Image (spheres, rainbow, N blue to C red):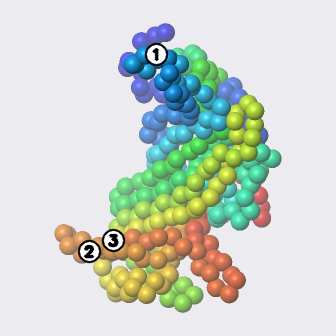
Amino acid sequence: MADSTFETRQVRFGYREQSDFDVPELVSAEFAEITCDPFDIDPGLIIHQLPNQHGSRNPVQQNTVHSTKGAVSKFSVNGPLDVADVDQFLYAHFQKVVEAGDTEYTKTFTYFTEHPNFASDEGHFLTWIKYFPESGTSQHVGGCIAPRFKITGERNGMLLFESDWVAYGTSDDDVTPSGTWTPPDGSNIVEFNDLTTGGATLTRGAGLTSPVAITLQSFELESVYEAMAIGANTTTGFERFGMANRSGTFKIDILRDGTVDEAISSMKVGEMVQLDLDFGNITITVTGKVESYEYHTEGLLAASLSCNMFGTYSTGSWGEPLTIVVLNSRDRSWPAA
């Protein structure tokens, strides 16, 4: 093997939409390469600790048993938000999408109400590859979903995403990708300054019907659920993922004005608020309750509002706590309704 000490920039990361939950896409297929922070893939090794009964004061090799049956590989993908890819990642998180037939193939992501049965190839999952330049050294995982997704942005910066992933089974660590990998050109990166005029609003009060424009300085939005291995399979140790205990938070830094004061009043009575952000090719709508606030007195007087995400509920009608819409002109042939 060649000396790889100085080859860190040659490591590449890519994904491919997967058809069968328990069958990763072939490494010879075409993969979409992304720009992201370097990451490691935890192969999900299970170590069983056995009683020490072998006549020695020291641990001996028989004291542990290593197994990959039931393994759930884990990794995190973080980087600039690129609308050419983010729809794939959002679908792997939300597990629900409606794709319109317009010229932008507008995709609307909300939380599922009917749990997908991954064992029947329902839902959305990806194959990921960590691509090393040396033959037979790359890592390959399939059946990947994203139980955590976070978007952040601040003035004069790019929108960034963070995501945690789990995979069906352990990783293959000795593959050689041979398909076409095309790097992104950066043209689809979303900047904070893409925020449209009047595109940041905060709404409070009954029915959430009267949005007020705010001067946004930064924001954070995070959505999380638990992904658990369930079911039985004699090869992998489990059959599919189950998703439960959904939660979320959002935080905004805005210039202090009357809207801030009203939001703080809403906090005291547990009133719902709604944040809407429009960056042109991606829009975000999230509802919740203000849990805390903090004033910043250095420079411009601004306030940080921290909120827990909640959906609205009234007389049997349930409102979406989080909706993200992506316009990227890519026909994915995803569900139209």
Residue under numbered circle 3: 304
Which is more foreground, mark 3 or mark 1?
1
Which residue is found at the position 62% from the left and 72% from the top? 320
Which residue is found at the position 67% from the left and 56% from the top? 95
Secondary structure beneath dot 1 equals loop
Secondary structure beneath dot 3 equals strand
Relative depth, front residue between 236 and 122: 236
Callout 2: few (<14), some (14-19), or many (20+) C-alpha neighbours within 10 Å?
some
Residue under numbered circle 2: 295
Which residue is found at the position 46% from the left and 10% from the top? 2
Residue 211 coordinates in the image, percent (x, y): 49, 83
Q: Earlier in the sequence, mark 2 or mark 3?
A: 2
Q: Earlier in the sequence, mark 1 or mark 2?
A: 1
Residue 58 coordinates in the image, percent (x, y): 40, 19
Q: State if disc 3 and disc 2 touch (CB < 8 Å).
A: yes
Residue under numbered circle 1: 55
Count of all numbered marks drawn on residues in the image: 3
Callout 3: few (<14), some (14-19), or many (20+) C-alpha neighbours within 10 Å?
many
Work out whether residue 89 can be spotted: no
**Identity, as a three-letter code, of the amino acid under mark 1:** Gly
